[in-house]
Image (tube, rainbow, N blue to C red):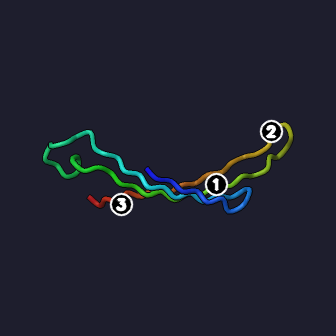
Amino acid sequence: MAIAEYLWSENFSITAQFDFYSTPFHGNGSDVFDKGVTETVLGFSYRIAGFSYRIAQHWLWQAYAVENVDFI
């Protein structure tokens, strides 16, 4: 797993991530189960000021998109 985050401003950041998961099913003869999974992730975080002093001071909104790049 490798992750990079770029802090664009005090309230906004962009995240890129690369994941590889090895399979727990080795040697069964199926390409789907024998291979691991490789994923890429792109996301962002945005911090929003709270609505009132009674509610939490800051809200963090995050969105991520995950794509499997193995094409098996």
Q: Nearer the viewer, mark 3 or mark 2?
A: 3
* Badge 2 vs badge 1, beta-carbon distance below 8 Å: no
* 26 with respect to 44 (left or right): left
> Which residue is rendered at x = 68% and y = 58% of the image?
12
Q: Classify residue 22 by image quadrant.
A: top left
Which labelled disc corresponds to residue 45? 1
Q: Furthest-top residue in view?
A: 54
Q: Is residue 54 above or below residue 8?
A: above
Residue 66 location, x and y as percent?
45, 55
Query: Which label's residue is closer to the chain start, 1 or 3?
Result: 1
Which labelled disc corresponds to residue 55? 2
Viewer-closest of 66 and 5: 5
Cα distance, mark 2 to mark 1? 20 Å
Viewer-closest of 59 and 37: 37
> Which residue is rendered at x = 43% and y = 58% of the image?
40
Cα distance, mark 3 to mark 2? 41 Å
Amino acid at circle 2: Ile
* 43 with respect to 10 (left or right): left
> Which residue is rendered at x = 58% and y = 56% of the image?
5
Residue 63 location, x and y as percent?
58, 54
The C terminus: image quadrant: bottom left
Quick one: SS at disc 1? strand
Residue 52 location, x and y as percent?
85, 43
Which labelled disc corresponds to residue 69? 3
